[in-house]
Amino acid sequence: MSSKLRAILLGVALLLPSLVFLVMFTALPVAQTIINSFYRRNLATRNQPVWDGLGNYVRLFAADSDFWQVLTNTLFAIAIVVPISVILAFLFALLLNQRIRGIGWLRSSIFYPTILPMVSAASIWLLMFNVDFGLVNTFIKLVGGKAQNILGTTDWALWAVSFVIIWKLTGFLMVFYLAGLQGMPTDVMEAARLDGAGAWHTMRYITLPLLRGTTIFVITVAVTNAFQTVDHLYVMTQGGPNNASNLLLFNIYETNFRFQDSGLAYAETVVLLVLLIIFTIANTVVADQRSFDAQ
Amino acid sequence: MRNKLTQSLNLIVLFGLGLLWAVPLLWSIALSFRPPNVPISIGSTWWGGSFSFASILKALDSAPFGTYYRNTIIVVFGILIVQIFTITLAGFVFARLKFPGRDALFLLFLLQLLVPIAILIIPNYATIRSLGLFNNLVAIMLPFWASAFGTFLMRQTFRTVPLDYEDAAKMDGANWWQTLWHVYIPPARPALAAFALVSLSSHWNDFLWPLVVTNSVDTRTLTVGLASFTQMSESGAEWSLIMAGTLLVVWPLLVLFLVFQRQFIASFVQSGLK
């Protein structure tokens, strides 16, 4: 046996255990999702797939479809969660990048929501938002406001569930900024200080540009998290009231398991995949553009 | 004088921030140890008059937490053990073996980074059904047995091992698995430990997937059990009970985190910086 053939056989054999699961649970499912999105399959078809062309998409994007609301909710949640959590993560990292006693505990008190199961966090926040004695309403009353049934109000429910994602995500994003700040070249900082650069100038022209890579990475993490995090909806709002806090992935789950319309659920999954891919491409382009500018 | 002022202001801001973030957890702990029949009202928001284990005991009594613990532990370690095997082999291939077609296979791993498994819940559910694994603990683990992110981590780690070591091992007549075992794995232990912490804590938290592929108490994990427990107790507004249930789910991770704070944070950072 030639050595080249042997190299191929060994390489493929070692990759095989991973490849089996990658193909079964990632590659084929993507193809399966696209194909199945063209079939109608629900209680009306007795759960048999019936070719329907673009039928699912037509129903999904019909003028009276709830899907528009779910889609705008998802984009709105991302538009709130990503900038706020990234900016907070950066500010917290700046504040917590000091050498003082007990700083480790402070960092942990911001980071711990990362390791908390979202369902548990949701149980806690369900109580925090409780209209009668939740701490959020206690605070609102303290500053002179009126207690609100936050999770039961269409105007507030989406803000509330987005806030929980921000609370859980910020500490995780923060540790990447902390690592970035601690990796700053001290000689550059020192040189800037000697040249009389003020805090703002150092931030604007040295710290932020050096953290560019971290920021791009952190934004990617924040976006993928915001698309995927829906566990709390199950406990806190079930997507309600009136779909006000429903997000795409949770809606996919409901469409398939509650309304038994798997054809539609597949079409919704395609929409989610497309959104993720659009974001990834946009992020890559922006990242390349900026590094091109920097040269 | 001014220095002292900014210093104390700095400390107040820091402390306030930490407290603000920690309040939900602290409150839930406080409520877990409050007598179950004392209503929460203004003035007794935090302290219910006495310290009591009654809520915890009642929670343990009203849901099969023992089964939930067992299932979660089987699932998280079942995932981790297979992952360590698959990512070590795949990481080794991408770090050190060269053969035609390797880079094409690499794209499959990239695909998993682009499309998280959580999103493919509908087709994966269909796959589990057709495999006849519905309501089986294996179904909860199966999709995670290949990890692109773990593979990348191992690939980066193995690449830092000097090639001379491998050459020396080959001179001594070592075959590929002896080389992997004696040359590559020992320096990769910290990376594997970091991966283990991240994998364990993230799968301890999985919810939607175990929820859809199981339908009985015997196969429920802690998170799924907690969600139904919360829904059951919410109607009775038994908040101390719900918080006790929550605490029962989070304490193992929380204790582990408090003991190994630095390692945890470092692991999450390392796993992110591919």
Image: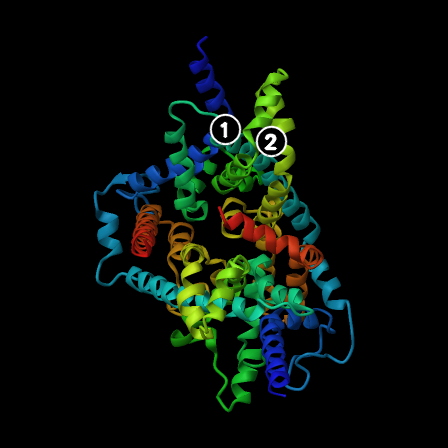
Which residue is labeled 2 in the image? B184
Amino acid type of the residue that numbered disc 1 sits on in the rendered structure: Arg
Among the 4 quarters of the image, the one containing residue B4: bottom right
Could you say which disc has been placed on residue A259 in the image? none
Residue B29, position in %: x, y? Answer: 68, 69
Left or right side of B130 for A291 = left
Among the 4 quarters of the image, the one containing residue A51: top left
Q: Secondary structure at mark 2?
A: helix
Where is the N terminus of chain B found, in terms of image quarters? bottom right
Residue A82, position in %: x, y? Answer: 41, 64
Near mark 2 (Cα within 10 A), the count class, few <14, some 14-19 or many ≥20, is many
Q: Which color scheme did the rendering employ for the protein?
A: rainbow
Which residue is labeled 1 in the image? B96
Residue B78, position in %: x, y? Answer: 61, 38
Q: Secondary structure at mark 1?
A: helix
Among the 4 quarters of the image, the one containing residue A118: bottom right
Residue sitting nearer the eye, A70 or B10: B10
